[in-house]
Amino acid sequence: MIPDLPAALVTVVQNVCGAFIVLTLALAVGAALDVANDLYRRRPDAASKPIKGYLQVVKIVIYAVAAILIIAALIDRSPLILLSGLGAMAAVLMLVFQDTLLSLVASVQISSNDMVRVGDWIEMPQLNADGDVIDIALHTVKVQNWDKTITTIPTKRLITESFKNWRGMSESGGRRIQRSLLIDQNSVRFFSGAERERLHRFALLREYLADKEREIGEWNAKLEAQGRDPVNARRLTNIGTFRAYVERYLRSHPGIHQEMTLLVRQRAPGPTGLPLEIYCFTNTTAWGEYEAIQSDIFDHLLAIIPEFGLRIYQEPGGADIRGLGDAARMLQSPDRRPAAGAAA
């Protein structure tokens, strides 16, 4: 020490040095915890069991203790004196650290119940979150949306509000296709004999047609034996045959998961036609491959449906309305009207 310095100045310098040492140690411990978290994140199970939230709680405790020691050093008082005064401030401290305590409880529940991991795709429409989880901290969970924006969600809201986690889809190995073809109901009819014969060209339908024709033949033979009116006879319909074709097409498609639910069903008809719903799963969860498989299926079905005498329902567009207008004008043109004085 420098000689002949006032005792008060020496005391101040010692107190400031002590406070600086405490601050340095607290920052060093905080940095060590950050390094520990970075090393832990390299483990394969780090995404399912993050420790960042717990380390943040430890850092808060360390910084709180460091703050008490720094204040005690600066005012040259025992830390116990400050701690004894904290009892009267307990209510204030609870209010100040309310969000931290709630976030800690939420972090424990999220981790113990394995609700969210880094890398999970989650949807939370009420917060405009739809994307991958990129960080799980004590107070917030960061989600990178598909448009590359970042949504920050308070951790406690993942406990108090509902959200959708797509991890199950990713782990299952299949992604759902659920889409309908809207059939024009005016195009639904029975097949004629010639049309049934023509359908035998479809390899996917040969077994179905053989079984169906045998079943219908036996049914109709019983009706004839009972002397009932032939109007009660069963016949093949184009909509039923097309539904059978779609199901067999999906079961033979290399991009469809054959171990998961696969069905083709009619939904309730409405003003936009008769929905023929396709419900199946692809054998990949990659977004691009999923969309390619789905588009390939519907490209084929939309192109093949006229072979069954069916039409897709579509609301009139501008070209359709112009065509109707042109037809109306042609009917009203003079050369289309009957000659004057023509005999009735």
Image (spheres, rainbow, N blue to C red):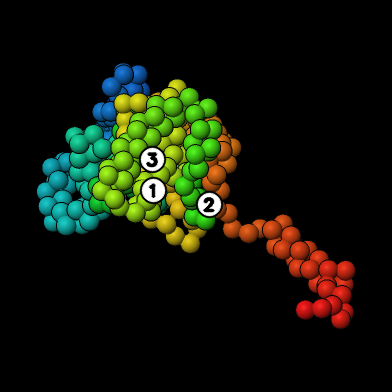
Q: Are marks 2 and 3 in contact (CB under 8 Å)?
A: no
Which disc is residue 187 wearing?
Answer: 2
Q: Is residue 243 visible?
A: yes
Measure the C-alpha gap from mark 3 to mark 1: 7 Å
Q: Circle 3 — which element? A: strand
Please report the residue visible at 31 percent of the width from the left and 41 percent of the height from the top: 221
Pinpoint residue 34: horizontal percent, then vertical percent: 34, 27
Residue drawn at point x = 41 percent, y = 32 percent: 209
Q: Which residue is mark 1?
A: 266
| Side of 245 where 61 appears, left or right | left
Most foreground residue, 120 or 15: 120
Figure quadrant of residue 76: top left
- Helix, strand or loop at disc 2? helix
Q: Amino acid at mark 2?
A: Ser
Of the pair 88 and 261, the residue shown nearer to us: 261
Image coordinates of residue 289 in percent, x first then y, are 50, 28
Query: Which is more N-terminal, label 2 or label 1?
Result: 2
